[in-house]
Amino acid sequence: MSRHFLTMASISIKSDDDIKGMRIAGRLAAEVLDFIAPYVKVGVTTGELDRLCHEYMVNVQDTIPAPLNYCPPGYTPYPKAICTSVNDVICHGIPGDKVLKNGDVVNLDITVIKNGYHGDTSRMFYVGEPSIMAKRLGEITYECMWLGISKIKPGNHLGDIGFVIQQHAENAGYSVVREFCGHGIGTVFHEEPQILHYGRPGTLDEMKAGMIFTVEPMINAGRREIREMGDGWTIKTKDRSLSAQWEHTVLVTPTGYEVLTVSPGMPAPPAFIKTAIAA
Ligand code: MF3
Ligand code: CO
Ligand code: CO
C-alpha cells in the first residue's frame, strides 16, 4: 500500500481486546483465500473471483470487504471487493472481464472488516502450469515475506525487515518496489508504521510488543520502476516484467511475532522458519 495513504503520527500499541479482534479478522481474511483457491483456474474471469469472494464475505462470514469504496486522499473510490493483480500488475488490479489463461500468475489480496477490525492478506496463485520463471519469482517472494516476518521481535528495528527482504530479492536478480509498502493496521486499514521492503538494519522505529502491521513485499522479475494505469488504481511494472507479492498481518509479541492471517489452507512457511506461529 502506498505511503501517502498514511497520515497518523505515532504507532499504536494494541490492547488485549484489540488483539483478540485482530486474530478473528486475520483468520477470516485468510479463509477467504482458502475458499477461492479452487476457483482460480483457466477460463475464470477476475470479476468472477471478485463476485465469489464478495458473496462469501457478506453471506457466509458476515464480514465487510474493506477495499469496496475505499477512497484514500487523491484516489477515486475502489470499485470492487478484492484486488486481482495478474502477471505484470504489481498491485491494486481491479477485477473485471479479464479471463485467466494457462501460465498466468495472479495475486489475490483480501482485506475483511469484522467487528471494526481489519485482516489483510494476499497469496500468489498459478493458473494451470506456471513457467519456471514465474514459479521461481513466486517462491523467492514468499521467502522474502517470511524472512521479513522472522525479524519481528521487540527491540529489533523496522529497517531489519526491509534489509533481509531486499537482500534476498536482489541476490536472486530481482528488484523491490519502493512506492508501496506494508502498514500498521487495526480499526484503520492503513496506519503507521510504514513497513518498507528495503532498507538497512538498525534503522527506523524499534518494534514493541502490541504493534500490528503487514509485511507484503512486491518483487519484480525486472526493474523496480512502476507505471500507473488510467483507472486510478492499477499499478504495473514499467518494463512489463512479472511481479509477485505475498502478504500477512503480524502481531509483535513479547518474544517475537504471531501471524494473524492464518487458516487451514495457508501454505506452509519455508523450512528455514522454525516458529511459524510464535505465541
Ligand atoms: N490490500 C491492500 C494492502 O495490502 C490495499 C488495497 S486498497 C484497495 O494494503 F483499495 F485497492 F483495495
Ligand atoms: Co496491506
Ligand atoms: Co492487502
Image (cartoon, helix red, strand yellow):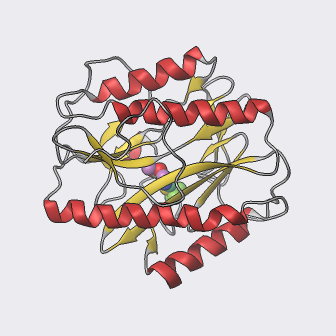
* Residue 12: x %, y % from top left: 18, 49
Vertical order, 127 against 69 (above or below): above
* Residue 42: x %, y % from top left: 83, 58
- At horizontal 24% and vertical 38% (from top left) the residue drawn is 256
| In the image: residue 53, left or right of residue 112 | right
- At horizontal 31% and vertical 18% (from top left) the residue drawn is 201
Between residue 129 and residue 1, name the one nearer to us. Answer: 129
| In the image: residue 25, left or right of residue 122 | left
User: How many marks overall?
Assistant: 0
- At horizontal 48% and vertical 17% (from top left) the residue drawn is 167
Vertical order, 106 against 175 (above or below): below
* Residue 1: x %, y % from top left: 46, 45
Residue 189 location, quadrant: bottom left
Outermost residue toward the bottom?
A: 59
Residue 139 appears in the figure: yes
Between residue 186 and residue 253, name the one nearer to us. Answer: 253
Residue 82 location, quadrant: bottom right
- At horizontal 44% and vertical 38% (from top left) the residue drawn is 181
Vertical order, 4 against 202 (above or below): below
Vertical order, 16 against 140 (above or below): below
| In the image: residue 215, left or right of residue 185 | right
